[in-house]
Amino acid sequence: MDKTKIAVLVSGGGTNLQALIDAEAGGILKSGEIVLVIANKPGAYALTRAEKAGIPALTITKKACGGQEAFEDALIDAMASHGVELVVLAGFMSILSERFIRHYVNRILNVHPSLIPSFCGKGFYGLKVHEAALAYGVKVTGATVHFVNEIPDGGRILLQKAVSILPGDTPETLQRRVMEQAEWIILPEAAELVSSQIQMEKEQQQ
Ligand code: GAR
């Protein structure tokens, strides 16, 4: 049975992309294969990770495309040409329009570094999420993998994992712990879950 073809969209360091690559190599992600990595930031280290793993990688920026619509068209074209069936946003710092999302209903996953519905939505990304959690004084945070719909961080939740906040935490130490103890575990698990569902649906259609 053909594996579900996955595109991973990134903007930065790509540690979540690495977790997916490692999960594929280690057999945790067994129903899906990463066929394409797209960065919207030139020089993102995630591109190097893709290259090292032998995965085709592209840079597509809104600036070079001349606007959001053309940017999203370029993403859609690139993914279509690789037969992509599942899109994983792994630290992708750009909000996608309804029009884009309609192309991939229930086929886009995002990892967010908090327990949604806390510290999420517009303006909550990367370190800002951990700064907000520390400023509020919560004692538990974590990560969420959810389907992407038209509401930022508002789509159906697939997996969550809690992580303790420790005395003396800084946004950076907390970010690292949330990645290690939650994101890098639940993102590959969620990718496998949805990849196997897509595989099953394809089998039923045959
Ligand atoms: C991760 O913590 C991810 O959850 C977060 O950005 C980081 C990217 O790191 N994403 C968001 O905040 C999206 N709202 P990475 O490039 O090393 O995977």
Image (cartoon, rainbow, N blue to C red):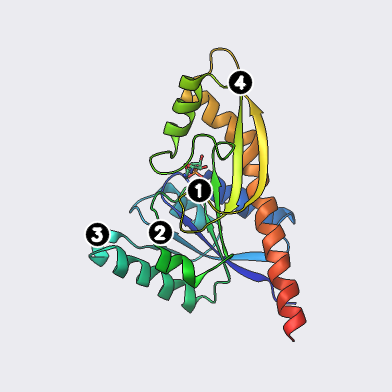
Mark closer to the chain start, 1 or 4: 4
Give the number of the mark in front: 3 or 1. 1
Give the number of the mark in front: 2 or 3. 2
Mark closer to the chain start, 1 or 2: 2
CA gap, disc 3 and disc 4? 40 Å
* Residue in the image at 49% along x and 34% along y: 119
Image quadrant where residue 63 sits: bottom left
CA gap, disc 3 and disc 1? 24 Å
Residue beneath label 2, please?
96
Residue beneath label 1, please?
153
Q: Can residue 31 be seen at all in this image of the molecule?
A: no
Q: Nearer the viewer, residue 59 or 101?
A: 101
Residue 187 higher or lower than 7, as above or below: above
* Residue in the image at 63% along x and 65% along y: 33
* Residue in the image at 54% along x and 77% along y: 83
| Label 3: few (<14), some (14–19) or many (≥20) C-alpha neighbours in 10 Å | few
Residue beneath label 3, please?
63
User: Which residue, as the protein is rendered here, is positioned at the far bottom?
Assistant: 206
For label 1, being within 8 Å of ligand 1 is answered yes
Position of residue 97 measured from the top left corner of the image (x, y, whole percent): 39, 62
CA gap, disc 2 and disc 3? 15 Å
CA gap, disc 2 and disc 4? 32 Å
Position of residue 29 measured from the top left corner of the image (x, y, whole percent): 70, 58
| Label 2: few (<14), some (14–19) or many (≥20) C-alpha neighbours in 10 Å | some
Residue beneath label 4, please?
139
- Element class at badge 3: helix
CA gap, disc 1 and disc 2? 11 Å
| Amino acid, disc 4 | Lys
Q: Disc 3 vs disc 1: Cβ atoms closer than 8 Å? A: no
